[in-house]
Image (spheres, helix red, strand yellow):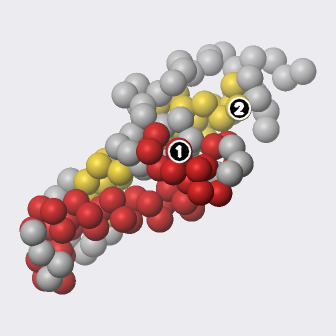
Amino acid sequence: MAEGIIVPAGWWPDAKTAGNDHMVAAYLAAHGGTAEDMSSDIAEAYSVGQVVQQAVAQKHSVDNAQLIDALHHGTFQTVQGTLTFDATGKPKGDSFLVQWQGGKAVPVYPAATAVARPEYPKPDWP
């Protein structure tokens, strides 16, 4: 990928989000490899568990109607950022931007989760 390109992302290994460090460490302990090799599908699945856990904790129940109410009215902290749901159950979450810098996708927005400032203007291609 070319240096300087900015793209949306739902997760990255170094994200400063709820439980991300724990998830990455636990996954690597169980499966080996490196954090950079982890698929974002892992974070998506883990986020589902985080939302369900928080909804159950809010309602002190596993009753389906109670959980639906929690999902429609709650705000949930996940490895993919803050997540809420609209009236139809469609998820509404944070958007992140990453930029290819120094051969690596680096989060540059929003500031609360960024690990680098955006490079602008884009460096010349080699």
In the rendered image, residue 41, in percent from the top left (x then y), is placed at 57, 61
Residue shown at 61% from the left, 49% from the top? 28
Disc 2/disc 1 C-alpha distance (Å): 20 Å
Q: Nearer the viewer, residue 105 or 42?
A: 42
Q: Is 80 on the left-hand or right-hand side of 24?
A: left
Q: Which mark is residue 94?
A: none
Q: Nearer the viewer, residue 49 or 102?
A: 49
> Three-letter amino acid code at disc 1?
Ala
Name the residue at the front extreme: 29
Q: What crowding class fits label 2: few (fewer than 14 Cα within 10 Å), some (14-19), or many (20 or more)?
A: few
Residue shown at 25% from the left, 74% from the top? 88
Looking at the rendered image, the quarter that the N terminus falls into is top right
Is residue 15 visible to the viewer in this orientation of the structure? yes
Judging by the rendered image, the residue that carries numbered circle 1 is 25
Residue shown at 62% from the left, 18% from the top? 119
Judging by the rendered image, the residue that carries numbered circle 2 is 104
